[in-house]
Image (cartoon, rainbow, N blue to C red):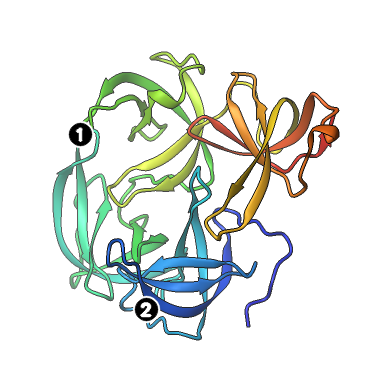
């Protein structure tokens, strides 16, 4: 059975139990999904597309990592791989050394290998090296959409970044990429190139040549990291006062009605904060709300439930 939790909040990067209740097809796009029950008693959908080899069946309890929670509260899950475990080293069949252009347009070296399900996986490397018996030992850094992200520390000095950790980056230029969106182009301390959309940080006052501290949030199978700069005013996990704006109601993706309040940050951005109790006009005798900064996404604060009304 799935043990229930009273916390009613998921944390990115954490692993939870889910029960597979059913398999369904959505009428809008004809895609097939596993219907999962989470520890809060709510329903979550997991596409079957990437997990045909996982032997996930109705009635089973599976473990999934919360890979991402987007700005709208949608949860993206990654089931535990049936073979590969994060941080472990495994043998992979070598296919070839190759070159490719990354998302920014720079050429980079890669080694292509095959995993246990015959998926071809690209591993970043700085140089070619000798491979014995066509087998390469690689470390599983994490798994995304059933594909293991691998590193070659035994053979090569290409440095990867760890998800959840902070690094110093230098802004080297600003330009539009293939999607016609403007980005800051960044270099990490290992010389690897990254990018950051300028549209989310207009009040951060970033300039070319600045060194900025950023947290690695996630990794895309297209070959780049999602990074989030430190906020110029707010620190994660610290408590601040915010100006109260209004109250509101909404319906979440489970069909549950939610009460919330809206506050303003120092940049005059409206931030929604969930609050279990309904606040009528007679209850609003305050002008400020104390909340903890739990996270940052695209320059926006994600706040805790209200701690105090002032």
Mark 2–mark 1 CB contact (< 8 Å): no
Please tell me which residue lies in front, 259 or 33. Answer: 259
Q: Quadrant of residue 89?
A: bottom left
Mark closest to the chain's N terminus, 2 or 1: 2
Quick one: quadrant of the N terminus?
bottom right
Q: Is residue 299 visible?
A: yes
Residue at which label 2 appears? 54
**Res 69 label:** none
Residue at which label 1 appears? 106
- Residue 42, position in %: x, y? 59, 67
39 lies above or below 293: below
- Residue 251, position in %: x, y? 58, 51
Please tell me which residue lies in front, 141 or 269. Answer: 269
The mark closer to the camera, 2 or 1, is 2
Q: Residue furthest front?
A: 281
Q: Quadrant of residue 231?
A: top right
In screen coordinates, is 135 left or right of 206? left
The secondary element bearing badge 2 is classed as loop
Residue found at x 72% / y 45%: 275
Quick one: quadrant of the C terminus?
top right
Residue found at x 31% / y 72%: 91
- Residue 96, position in %: x, y? 14, 60
Distance, label 2 to label 1, CA atoms, is 35 Å
The secondary element bearing badge 1 is classed as loop
Residue found at x 19% / y 33%: 105
- Residue 141, position in %: x, y? 42, 58
Q: Is residue 303 visible?
A: no
In screen coordinates, is 72 left or right of 31? right
Q: How many marks?
A: 2
102 lies above or below 240: below
């Amino acid at each position: 059975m799935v043990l229930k939790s009273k916390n009613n909040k998921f944390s990115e990067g954490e692993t939870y139990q889910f029960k597979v209740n059913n398999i369904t097809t959505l009428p809008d796009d004809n895609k097939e999904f596993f219907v999962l029950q989470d520890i809060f008693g709510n329903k979550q959908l997991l596409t079957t597309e990437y997990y045909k080899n996982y032997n996930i069946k109705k009635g089973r309890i599976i473990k999934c990592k919360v890979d991402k929670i987007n700005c709208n509260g949608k949860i993206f899950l990654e089931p535990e791989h049936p073979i590969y475990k994060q941080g472990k080293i495994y043998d992979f069949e070598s296919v070839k050394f190759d070159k490719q252009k990354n998302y920014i347009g720079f050429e980079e070296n890669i080694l292509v290998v095959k995993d246990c399900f015959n998926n071809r996986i690209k591993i970043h490397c700085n140089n070619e090296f000798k491979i014995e018996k066509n087998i390469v030992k690689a470390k599983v850094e994490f798994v995304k959409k059933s594909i293991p992200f691998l590193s070659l520390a035994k053979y090569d000095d290409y440095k990867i970044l760890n998800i959840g950790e902070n690094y110093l980056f230098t802004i080297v230029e600003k330009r539009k990429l293939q999607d016609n969106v403007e980005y800051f182009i960044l270099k990490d301390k290992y010389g690897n190139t990254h990018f950051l959309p300028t549209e989310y940080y207009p009040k951060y006052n970033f300039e070319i040549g600045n060194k900025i501290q950023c947290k690695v949030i996630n990794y895309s199978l297209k070959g780049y990291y999602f990074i989030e700069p430190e906020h110029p005013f707010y620190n994660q996990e610290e408590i601040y006062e915010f100006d109260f704006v209004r109250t509101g109601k909404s319906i979440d993706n489970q069909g549950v009605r939610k009460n919330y309040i809206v506050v303003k940050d120092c940049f005059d951005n409206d931030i929604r904060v969930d609050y279990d109790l309904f606040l009528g006009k007679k209850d609003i005798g305050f002008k400020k709300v104390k909340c903890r900064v739990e996270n940052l996404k695209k320059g926006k604060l994600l706040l805790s439930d209200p701690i105090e009304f002032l």
